Image (tube, helix red, strand yellow):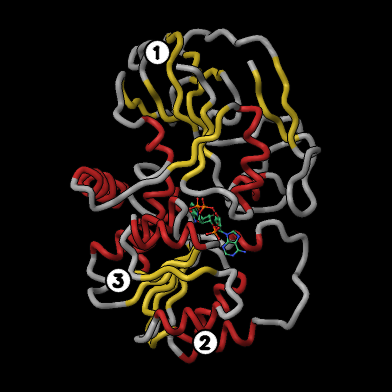
Amino acid sequence: NRRIVLAQRPVGAPDADTLRLETSDVPAPGAGEMLLRTEYLSLDPYMRGRMNDAKSYAEPVKIGEEMTGQVVAQVVTSNIEKFQPGDYVLAGSGWQDYAISDGSMVINLGENPQNPSWSLGVLGMPGYTAYAGLLKIGEPKPGETVVVAAASGPVGATVGQIAKIKGCRAVGIAGGAEKCAHVVENLGFDVCIDHNADDFAQQLAAACPDGIDVYFENVGGKVLYGVLPLLNPFARMPVCGVVAWYNLTGLPDGPDMAPAVMGAILRNKVKVQGFIIFDSFGPETYKEFVDDMTGWLKEGKVQYKEQVVDGLENAPSAFNDLLVGKSFGKMVVKVGTA
Ligand code: NDP
């Protein structure tokens, strides 16, 4: 059994000393327990926060403990009635080959789910984040302009596609020509701007001739500063993430932007609301998401791209890639061989 543990807390970007691969015997399940074998491990930006020893909405990972993470696993042996060997499950068992579970907080996906790894993406946490954040906080109306960055990633891609379904103009922002082409050609956004362009702010302004009604905040940084002057009166800003700043160890150099940010919010009467997906919305919203998203995928109205990395041992470097935009699509690690 291999597991990847937090060896030391990173200062800035995680490096070779941050995580360590350990091996041990495969554990045996006791009464009321089952043994899970990880098939796919989800890599998500929030994991960077778990490496810090700082107060947040969730406990940090302890030194020497395996990294947390959602997985799709297969039940190997089970002493729990409602889980049978061979069943696929969605569990929070982290960066390891095998895990013991008592079945709590585990969702049974059945013996033969169609795309098991999608439960980590478009049909799971990131998809639900996009759906609930956009529709319940962003409240987009037909004809409005919705802007989202990290537009080729699982949250941003879903935000823009739902915006189109709701009759909005969808403006994506992504890193590089290849991602931008995918966002427009395959995902159906109206336009996508490369945030690496020198004239990014001008290009964004040109892409939003009627201003911005909903800015779904995924990244922060210069994207946020480009958006501010374009916000319309009564714009909405669901604050989902600020990945551009996750590796910061202190305040960045440069001018204090707080007056510009707060001034734009004040003058335009912008509604800004942060949210954490697992405790910000009720079970009715989750049910609406599952119903709508299942239908949209079936009808081909939502497209989904994954980047599958082979082997648990490659998870640490893949995770670093994810934080700096070297991933393309939802990043999952193929751990098992089944
Ligand atoms: P992605 O797979 O899209 O990965 C993050 C992407 O962010 C990178 O691929 C990169 O895309 C982009 N990025 C990184 N640095 C910068 C930068 N400096 N400027 C602009 N873009 C940058 O991530 P997810 O879709 O999984 O998550 C998107 C956001 O949603 C994250 O902030 C995440 O933390 C947040 N989130 C929040 C949740 C909540 O409950 N609040 C739940 C789930 C996710 P590119 O190359 O295109 O720039």
Image quadrant of residue 271?
Answer: bottom left
**Above or below: residue 48 compared with residue 16:** below
C-alpha distance separating marks 1 and 2: 55 Å
Q: Which residue is mark 2?
A: 264
Sequence-wise, the earlier of marks 1 and 3 is 1
Mark toward the start of the polypeptide (2 vs 3): 3
Q: Residue at x 48, y 92 (%)?
A: 267
| Pointer 1 residue | 80
Identify the residue position indicated by label 3 in the image: 140
- Residue 178: assigned label: none
Distance between mark 1 and mark 3 Cα atoms: 44 Å
Q: Tell me where residue 160 sits by quadrant.
A: bottom left
Can you give x and y, in whole percent of width and height, for residue 307 in the image? 49, 41
Q: Write the residue at 52% across / 68% down.
A: 194
Q: Is residue 291 left or right of residue 179?
A: left
Residue 331, given in percent of the width and then of the height, sits at: 51, 42
The residue under label 2 is which amino acid type?
A: Ala
Residue at left offset 67%, top offset 53%: 55
Q: Which percent across, then down, holds residue 158?
A: 36, 55
- Label 3 Cα neighbours within 10 Å, binned few <14 / some 14-19 / many ≥20: many
Image quadrant occupied by the N terminus: top right
Q: Secondary structure at mark 1?
A: loop
